[in-house]
Image: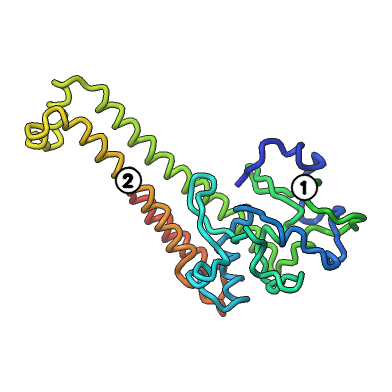
């Protein structure tokens, strides 16, 4: 998900791979918890892998993390996604240090790096204005991220990015199709509208409502659209996030099964 307008405005204009050495080392942050204490808004967006890791670290399920106000849901890039609740800083911050550091979310691992997605994968860039630490040291990006199985994780990130695009397109298509039909009904003259009602088996409704049929039908289609969009988002959240993962089993295998199921469910929603 790309939420920046021009990468050159926030970076050094260069793109890097995981094997590259860059100046982002902060000596373990040396007690600095500026980013963790800040109001980061909805920016720490969580993936299913993040939830798997946070569940393992905290012993709390997705629902329990929600109830504890550690995470929350927001509309992000036109769909609903979970993110850390950061209005008063991160709830995992303990005496200036991260209490779940070994299981911290991907965006936390990246900072001050970002990702830019390309046709065949992604590359990293440095957010040059975000971290206040001075005299940064060189470090290899893969080592900075500290993920146990980088190859599988990279594959997952690419799958997740493609799924997000799929879900966004699904929502957009539902709204566009509904918009077309509503506009078509709005622009019909009364004779065309009566014929339309007969074709879809609503001639009795038309006879009963007469001039009110048009507005009633348009409102009905809006409600159907809203319901379908909510079903898409609810299904994705339920299958990929809310249903507990087995933290003793391999995450990537579980995710692949769920992803296939989720795509199948979303394709059936009109």
Single out the residue that lies furthest toward the front.
88
* Crowd around label 2: few <14 · some 14–19 · many ≥20 (10 Å): some
Q: Residue at x 16, y 32 (%)?
A: 213
Q: Residue at x 53, y 60 (%)?
A: 72
Residue 176's place in the image compared with 92, above or below, is: above
Residue 160's place in the image compared with 209, above or below, is: below
Disc 1: which residue: 127
Residue 29 drawn at (x, y percent): 83, 64
Q: Residue at x 24, y 28 (%)?
A: 185
Q: In the image, is 11 to the left or to the right of 191?
A: right
Q: Please name whichever residue, 53 or 80, is drawn nearer the observer in this view of the structure.
A: 80
Residue 61 drawn at (x, y percent): 51, 73
- Which type of secondary structure does the marked residue at label 2 adopt? loop
* Crowd around label 1: few <14 · some 14–19 · many ≥20 (10 Å): many
Figure quadrant of residue 110: bottom right
Q: Residue at x 20, y 30 (%)?
A: 214
Q: In the image, is 227 to the left or to the right of 142?
A: left
Q: Which label belongs to residue 112?
A: none
- Which type of secondary structure does the marked residue at label 1 adopt? loop
Single out the residue that lies furthest toward the right.
135
Figure quadrant of residue 77: top right
Q: In the image, is 253 to the left or to the right of 268?
A: right
Residue 173's place in the image compared with 180, above or below, is: below
N-terminal-most mark, 1 or 2:
1
Residue 54 drawn at (x, y percent): 60, 71
Q: Which label belongs to residue 270?
A: 2
- Cα separation between marks 1 and 2: 40 Å
**Mark nearer the viewer, 1 or 2:** 1
Find out whether the residues at labels 1 and 2 contact each other: C-beta distance under 8 Å: no
Q: In the image, is 265 to the left or to the right of 21?
A: left
């Amino acid at each position: 998900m790309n939420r920046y307008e021009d990468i050159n405005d926030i970076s050094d204009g260069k793109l890097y791979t995981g094997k590259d050495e860059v100046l982002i080392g902060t000596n373990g942050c040396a007690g600095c918890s500026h980013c963790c204490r800040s109001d980061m808004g909805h920016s720490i967006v969580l993936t299913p892998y993040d939830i798997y890791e946070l569940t393992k670290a905290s012993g709390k399920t997705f629902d329990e993390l929600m109830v504890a106000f550690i995470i929350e849901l927001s509309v992000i890039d036109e769909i609903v996604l979970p993110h850390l609740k950061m209005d008063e800083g991160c709830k995992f911050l303990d005496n200036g240090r991260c209490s779940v550091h070994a299981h911290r979310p991907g965006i936390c691992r990246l900072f001050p790096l970002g990702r830019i997605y390309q046709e065949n994968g992604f590359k990293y860039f440095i957010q040059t204005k975000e971290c206040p630490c001075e005299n940064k040291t060189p470090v290899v990006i893969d080592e900075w991220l500290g993920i146990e199985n980088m190859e599988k994780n990279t594959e997952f990130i690419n799958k997740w990015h493609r799924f997000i695009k799929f879900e966004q397109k699904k929502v957009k298509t539902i709204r566009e199709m509904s918009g077309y039909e509503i506009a078509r009904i709005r622009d019909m003259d009364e004779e065309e509208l009566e014929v339309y009602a007969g074709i879809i088996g609503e001639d009795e409704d038309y006879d009963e409502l007469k001039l009110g049929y048009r507005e009633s039908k348009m409102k009905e289609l809006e409600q159907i659209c809203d319901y379908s969009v909510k079903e898409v988002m609810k299904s994705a959240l339920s299958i990929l996030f809310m249903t507990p993962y087995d933290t003793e089993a391999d995450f990537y295998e579980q995710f692949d099964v769920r992803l296939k199921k989720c795509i199948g469910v979303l394709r059936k929603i009109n």
